[in-house]
Image: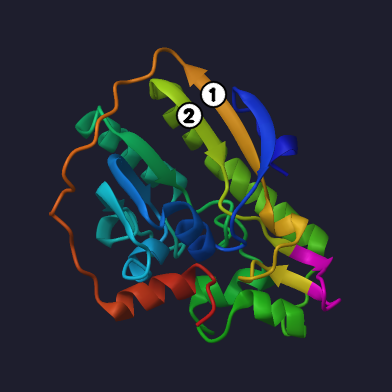
Amino acid sequence: MFERRSELPGQLESRVSRGSATTEFLSANLNGRDLRDTVYVTANPQFYQNQETIDTTFHKVIQVWQREGWDEEYGTVLPETVTKYANRAAEQYPNKRLLVHYMQPHYPFIDSATQFDKQHLTGEDRTGNVWDKLITGEIDISPDEIWRMYEDNLDRALPHIEKLMTELDGKTVVTGDHGNMVGERSSPIAISEWGHPRGMYTPELVTVPWLVFENGPRREIRADDPSTDTENVSSDVVAERLRDLGYAE
C-alpha cells in the first residue's frame, strides 16, 4: 500500500519489524537502550501505558495524545498535529534525534463515516474491539472497502509527513511499527484474521516500508540528562484513548 500510494522523496526498501503490534515493537527496539540523545514525539499512548515494563531512557517524551493534541471528534491524533509537535521539538532540541510516531494509517479512519466506523464516530457502542467484530461477523464489510479506508488514511497523513521530513536536516527514515491483517488467512490456525494481534508474525504484519531520505548535512547529536517535566494522566483517560484507537480492552 505504501509503495502504491506514497510519492515521498527518498529510496524505498522494506524491513521486517520486530513486532506485530506497537507494544512488541517498542519493547523489542527500546528495551535496555540508553536514548538520552533522542526525543520521542508520539501520538500513541502505548509507551505511556507500558513505560514500567520498557527499560529505556529518552531525553524527552512528548505525549501528543494528551490534552490539546487529542482530537475528540475523530478519536485520534491528526497527522498535522503530530507534524506541528515534531517541528516544535526539532526547534527546541536541535541536537537530538527525533522518533516521531504518527497514528495513521492506523484505525480510526479519519474521513470514512461507514458502518464499520459507526460505533467509533457516534459513541453508540464503546464495547469490544472493531477487529474482533470483523472476525466474528458482527461487522460485515469487504476487505476491499477496508483497504480503501486504509489508503485514504495513509493519503491523509502523507502530505504532513513530507512537510516534516523536508524541513528536517540530515537523514530521515519513514517506516511502520507493524502492518495489519485485512481478512487474510492466518497461520498456524487458518482463519480470516483482522487487525494486528500480538504474537502473530505473518508477512502482512511484520513487513514494513523503509524509506530513506537524505536532506543535507546531518546535525551534531549529543546525549543529555533526561527531562523531568513529565505529566501524569489518569488511567481512565489512557484506557479511553486506547479504546478509541481500536485496541482491545
Residue 146 lies, in percent from the top left, at 73, 61
Task: Tell me if residue 184 is in the magenta stretch.
Answer: yes
Q: Are marks 1 and 2 in contact (CB under 8 Å)?
A: yes
Q: Secondary structure at mark 1?
A: strand
From the viewer's side, name the closer residue of 72 and 196.
196
Q: Earlier in the sequence, mark 1 or mark 2?
A: 2
Which residue has dot 2 on it?
Answer: 172
Task: Tell me if residue 174 is in the magenta stretch.
Answer: no
As displayed, is residue 85 above or below residue 63?
Answer: above
Q: Residue furthest front?
A: 32
For the record, the magenta segment spans 182-192
As displayed, is residue 77 above or below residue 90?
Answer: below
Q: With 67 as the anchor, is 27 left or right in this view?
A: right
As displayed, is residue 68 above or below residue 91?
Answer: below
Q: Residues within 10 Å of mark 2 (few under 14, many from 20)?
A: many
Q: Residues within 10 Å of mark 1 (few under 14, many from 20)?
A: some
| Residue shown at 75% from the left, 79% from the top | 135
Q: In this view of the protein, can residue 204 be seen by the observer? A: yes
Q: Name which residue type carries label 2.
A: Thr
Q: In this view of the protein, can residue 162 be seen by the observer? A: no
Quadrant into which the N terminus falls: top right
Q: How many tags in the picture?
A: 2
Q: Name which residue type carries label 1.
A: Phe
Residue 24 lies, in percent from the top left, at 53, 63
As displayed, is residue 240 above or below residue 154?
Answer: below
Quarter assignment of residue 189: bottom right
Which residue has dot 1 on it?
Answer: 213
| Residue shown at 56% from the left, 77% from the top | 119
Residue 59 lies, in percent from the top left, at 24, 45
Residue 169 lies, in percent from the top left, at 38, 20
Q: With 58 as the anchor, is 190 left or right in this view?
A: right
Quarter assignment of residue 242: bottom left
